Image: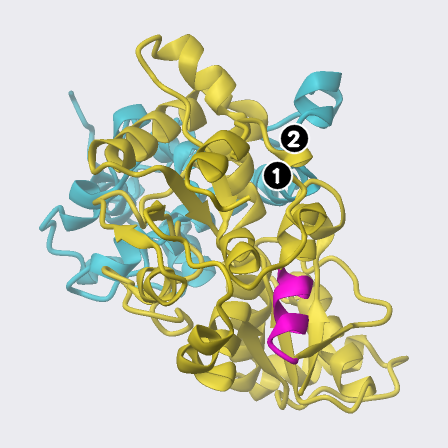
Amino acid sequence: MKVSYYPGCTLKNNAKNFEDSTICSLNKLGIQVEELPRWNCCGTVFSLATDDLIHHLAPIRNLIRTKETDSDSLMTLCAMCFNTLKRANERVKSDPESLDKINTFMYRENIKYEGDVKVLHLLELLRDEIKFEAIAQQIVKPLKGLKVANYYGCLLVRPKEIGLDDVENPTILETLTTVLGGDPIDFPYKTECCASYQTVDKPEIVAERTYHILTSAQSQGADVVTVSCPLCAFNLDHRQKETIKQYPEFKNIPILYFTQLLAIALGCPEDTLRFDLHYVDPKPILKEKGLI
Amino acid sequence: MRINLSKKKIEDPFIAKVEELSNQNLLACYQCGKCSAGCPAVSQMDILPNQIIRYAQLGLKDDLLKSKSIWICASCFTCNARCPKGINIAEVIEALRQILLRNREDHVKVEKLTDSEKGDVPPIAIISNLRKFTS
């Protein structure tokens, strides 16, 4: 099976660990990942104002690029890209007048967009197409004894019209953790916002959220916290530096992309995990559990 | 807190503008407070999400446009998911930000960001911050 892949801005630098671990894992599962040629930034946030059509152009252009490769679906890893691409797609599908205006604006594109590309998150590909049962059969290194708190954040599950699981209590990552042989830990902050882009001009707010989210996971016994968004990853991992300054009693905890755990369980080499990009080093706990 | 109501404020085109930009019916709100109860940002807010809707119904334009809250909201959509009347509160708050941004009143001044504020964060943070906080 081949999948068209949209990386987005941060997967090529700060979140290379997310990309490399995903590509290795999908290759192990027999999937050929084909990166979209000439992709452009999705804009990172879906435009909420009703009259703001211009900002839907960037995501829709990527869907046109997908059609140019004769593919009818586009997979992405980043929760923000997923949300922006999928919401823009749903918006134009339900509003032909807006779609018409957007197509007219992009008159130099060879293909007219008709709302006919499906936007998929990697988790949906794993659950609905590859299937968790098939993944279970490929596990070479079960995550035995690793207590994993899965953090969903906002944009994988909200709004519910585009979310990939239950809006209040998603469980897809806990199911996947069990498939990989780990112990999922439930905690009440798993869909609580990390304060997102406030990290640029108000990092102290992010540090406060990080403190509450991570201490909640720690109170339930988590060894690691997983994420599926490069911005959540930055806030929960790198902002632990600021968190300790604001809350001296805070103890560091490693943050991993869920795909890094998938890659470990599927036997991917350690260089695809790119631990050099982390602030809190995940190696000690993974070594202790015999996983690396 | 003292709030001054007037016929003039209630008839201000500001209310229609907020409803148009957000595509929401402000009068659907019956002040149950569920949006504020679930909002992760209320500790930093001066006007709570349910109060934002009430202020908007009453045309309290100046109080809303100078509030800290509209820049604290990070559009996490928890309020939208929980509103029993189906109001998208996050879209109403976006409309308030847009009213200021469209008058070139940027919340974040790009030229004032330090090298470390710009350089230490990933591209996704800079792009989303500037998309939400600048015109």
Classify mark 2: residues with Cα within 10 Å, few (<14), some (14-19) or many (20+).
Answer: some
| Residue B46 highlighted magenta (yes or no) | no
| Quarter holding residue A214 | top left
Are discs 2 and 1 both within one chain? Answer: yes
Span of residues in magenta = A22-30
Chain coloured cyan: B
Image quadrant containing the N terminus of chain A: bottom right
Chain coloured yellow: A
Question: Which residue is disc 2 drawn over?
Answer: B121
Left or right: B14, with A292 as reference point = left
Indicate the secondary structure of the residue bearing disc 1. Answer: helix
Q: Which mark is residue A81?
A: none
Q: Are marks 2 and 1 in contact (CB under 8 Å)?
A: yes
- What is the chain letter for disc 1? B
Relative image position of residue A135 (x, y in whole percent): 47, 75
Note whether B50 is above or below B120 in the view shown.
below
Classify mark 1: residues with Cα within 10 Å, few (<14), some (14-19) or many (20+).
Answer: many
Image quadrant containing the C terminus of chain A: top right
> How far, Cα to Cα, is label 2 from label 1?
6 Å
